[in-house]
Structure formats: structure tokens, C-alpha cells
């Protein structure tokens, strides 16, 4: 199974990619980590030194590497589906699942480690909430193209088991 996890930063994509990879006995990957390894820089450094456009092109290139793999679980970055036709490509090449957590949950999860995230590093809590609301509004039309959508309490082992059964 080729499984792509999409959603806003803080929605649990990285966590669930690791959990699902163990259960499926396949490779679990994090697209942002792969970009950092490839570029030998942190995401923050890439944004600062090369800019977002360079980052998004690199992200699309590395995402396309997964077209060659037979089975995996990939946590994408929050913006990955929104650039370079990535969402359509993922839908053609695997199963897409949108992890749709409430904004309050995202703020709670992101606040402690936001200095590592270039797009939200300098935002206070209210600004972070407004930023996430705006980004989600922008991204929802793309995220809605996902083959599956799990919201809040639906995001669990049981929900993923049902998805896996559909594609096994």
C-alpha cells in the first residue's frame, strides 16, 4: 500500500506515519525530514537561504521519488499537496488521507515547538490561531481532494484499519 498522509502542521502526520509503518511492516517516511537530509539543511535554513519557491520545487521532486516505491507510509508537509500538482499526483499514485484536526488542537500542539517552523516561528498564540485558520481556508479545496478524511476523534488505529482493509 502507498499511503500519503496530508493535513495541517500539527495534525499528527509524522506520528501516524511511524505507527502505520510499524503495523504494515513497511517503510515510514517524513517528507520534511527527507528534504532536510537531501539538502543537508533544516527546513528553516532552506526557507531563509533559498526561499519558499526553491523549497516547494525540492519538495515536489522528492515526493516524486515515491512513484518508484511499492509500499510505504509518507507524512507530507502541510503545504505539500498545494503546490506543483502534488495532490493530484498523490491521488494517482496511492491512497491519500487528510488528517483534519480542529484549529485549537493544532495551536496547542504547535505552540511549544514553533521556533523550528519557519512559517509560524514569530507568531503569538492569537496570531498563530489566525494564521492556521487562514491557511486551512486556503488549503481546504486541495485537502478535500483526499480519498479519505479523518477528523479529530476519528483519527485512531481503528479508522486506519478500516482504510487499510479497503486497499489490502
Image (spheres, rainbow, N blue to C red):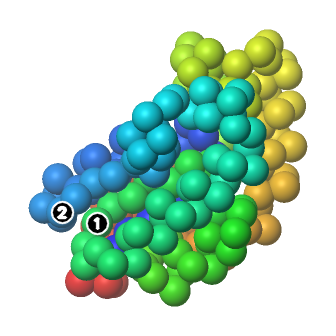
Q: Is residue 106 left or right of residue 11?
A: right
- The residue sitting at 79% across, 17% down in the picture is 123
Question: Between 165 and 17, which is closer to the camera in this rendering?
Answer: 17
Residue at label 2?
26
Q: CA distance from mark 1 to mark 2?
A: 6 Å
- The residue sitting at 49% across, 64% down in the picture is 63
**Mark 2 neighbour class, 10 Å CA radius: few under 14, some 14 to 19, many 20 or more:** some
Residue at label 1?
72
Q: Secondary structure at mark 2?
A: loop
Find residue 75 and report its horizontal and vertical position in percent.
Answer: 44, 53
Q: Secondary structure at mark 1?
A: strand
Residue 115, image quadrant:
top right
- The residue sitting at 83% across, 33% down in the picture is 131
Question: Between 25 and 83, which is closer to the camera in this rendering?
Answer: 83
Marks 2 and 1: in contact by CB < 8 Å?
yes
Find residue 134 and report its horizontal and vertical position in percent.
Answer: 86, 43
Q: Is residue 166 left or right of residue 54?
A: left
Question: Between 91 and 39, which is closer to the camera in this rendering?
Answer: 39
- The residue sitting at 53% across, 64% down in the picture is 61
Looking at marks 1 and 2 on the same chain, the residue that comes earlier in the sequence is marked by 2
**Mark 1 neighbour class, 10 Å CA radius: few under 14, some 14 to 19, many 20 or more:** many
Q: Is residue 3 left or right of residue 101?
A: left
Find residue 133 and report its horizontal and vertical position in percent.
Answer: 82, 41
Residue 130, image quadrant:
top right
Q: Is residue 143 visible?
A: no
Q: Is residue 132 visible?
A: yes
Question: Between 5 and 54, which is closer to the camera in this rendering?
Answer: 54
Q: Relative to 132, does residue 67 appear above or below in the rendering?
A: below
Q: Relative to 31, does residue 4 appear above or below in the rendering?
A: below
Q: Is residue 157 left or right of residue 34?
A: left
Amino acid at each position: 500500500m502507498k499511503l500519503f498522509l496530508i493535513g495541517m502542521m500539527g495534525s499528527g502526520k509524522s506520528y501516524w506515519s511511524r505507527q502505520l509503518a510499524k503495523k504494515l511492516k513497511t517503510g515510514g517516511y517524513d517528507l520534511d525530514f527527507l528534504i532536510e537530509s537531501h539538502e543537508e539543511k533544516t527546513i528553516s535554513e532552506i526557507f531563509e537561504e533559498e526561499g519558499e519557491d526553491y523549497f516547494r520545487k525540492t519538495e515536489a521532486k522528492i515526493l516524486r521519488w515515491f512513484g518508484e516505491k511499492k509500499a510505504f507510509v509518507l507524512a507530507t508537509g502541510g503545504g505539500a499537496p498545494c503546490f506543483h500538482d502534488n495532490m493530484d499526483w498523490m491521488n494517482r499514485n496511492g491512497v491519500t488521507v487528510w488528517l483534519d484536526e480542529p484549529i485549537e488542537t493544532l495551536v496547542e500542539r504547535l505552540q511549544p515547538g514553533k521556533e523550528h517552523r519557519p512559517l509560524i516561528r514569530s507568531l503569538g498564540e492569537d496570531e498563530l490561531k489566525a494564521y492556521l485558520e487562514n491557511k486551512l481556508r486556503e488549503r481546504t479545496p486541495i485537502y478535500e481532494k483526499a480519498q479519505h478524511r479523518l477528523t479529530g476523534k476519528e483519527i485512531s488505529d481503528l479508522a486506519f484499519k478500516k482504510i487499510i482493509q479497503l486497499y489490502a
